[in-house]
Image (tube, helix red, strand yellow):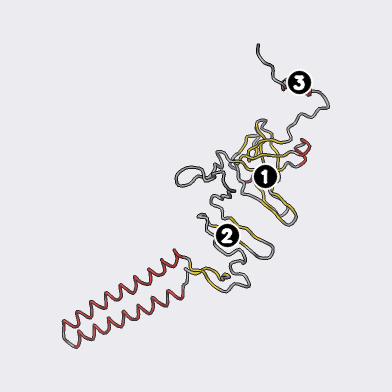
Amino acid sequence: MKSRPTVDWARLARATARAGNDTRHWISYGTVATVGGDDGTANYSDTNAVVISPASIDVDVILEPIGYPVTCQHGMQAGDVFIATPIRPGDQVIVAIPEGDPSAIPRILAVVSGASAPGPVGDDDKPIFKNDRALIFARNVPVDIRTAGGGRVLVDQDGNVVTEKTTLLGGADADQQVIKGNEYTDDENTMLDTIGNASTTAAGACSTAAAGGTLVAHSAGFTALATAFNALAAAIQQFRAVPDHLSDVTKTK
């Protein structure tokens, strides 16, 4: 004999589907998109779906699967703390609808992973999240944590802390500059290449002068040597004058 389920959801739905009963969902699934045109066609790439102002972050969402368009608020405010995550057209979201009434300004509870925002993977193409710790991953977006006192932490895409958490780059109490490795190497190589080329040219001219044995040849050799020293000095001055390899002043221990 076929067992009967404990709860018959179909019968419950029929029982509640009568006048005076609100059968709307208060939590819905949706996709960030705008609706336009005479036929109400959804546009899943329209950047106007997200409007950011000091008052709020307003996001146009199409509730699924009914296709009903609503404008939601995004971000969480708790006292002096405000938290907001990047949100873009095509993102899939979970929406809370106050009292089941879409006119009561629905709120986005979460942006979920999916085709528009897949979960992060490492170099081995396996998920970074291993369920053994909390993970904050920002694809092409720097992690920026600030406090009202001016403190700031920046984390780059490799997970490295760019500045100390106790200060802001260029802050009032900053006293040192940080060397930027890639820029330093480029500037250093430019200087060394100039010095090397000038030295090679001078060495060749001096060898020619020594072999020539004449006053004119010796004079040309000294001229080439002076030119090399001038190029060397100019390269060093350039290295010092254009410090692309130094950051803004920051606080150091």
Q: Quadrant of the N terminus?
A: top right
Categorize mark 2 by other alpha carbons within 10 Å: few (<14), some (14-19), many (20+). Answer: some
Please identify the quarter of the rendering in which residue 153 is found: bottom right
214 to the left or right of 56: left
Which residue is the site of mark 3? Answer: 14
Q: Amino acid at mark 2?
A: Leu
Q: Amino acid at mark 3?
A: Arg
Categorize mark 1 by other alpha carbons within 10 Å: few (<14), some (14-19), many (20+). Answer: many
| Front in this rendered view, residue 62 or 129 | 129
Q: Earlier in the sequence, mark 1 or mark 3?
A: 3
| Front in this rendered view, residue 123 or 192 | 123
The residue shown at (67%, 15%) is: 3
Q: Amino acid at mark 1?
A: Val
Which residue is the site of mark 2? Answer: 154
21 to the left or right of 222: right
Image coordinates for residue 64, horizontal then vertical, percent: 65, 33
Image coordinates for residue 30, horizontal then vertical, percent: 65, 37
Q: Which is more foreground, mark 1 or mark 2? A: 2
As measured in the structure, the alpha-carbon distance from the residue carrying label 3 to the one carrying label 2 is 55 Å
Q: Earlier in the sequence, mark 1 or mark 2?
A: 1
Which residue is the site of mark 1? Answer: 59
As measured in the structure, the alpha-carbon distance from the residue carrying label 1 to the one carrying label 2 is 27 Å
Is 19 placed above or below 212 here?
above
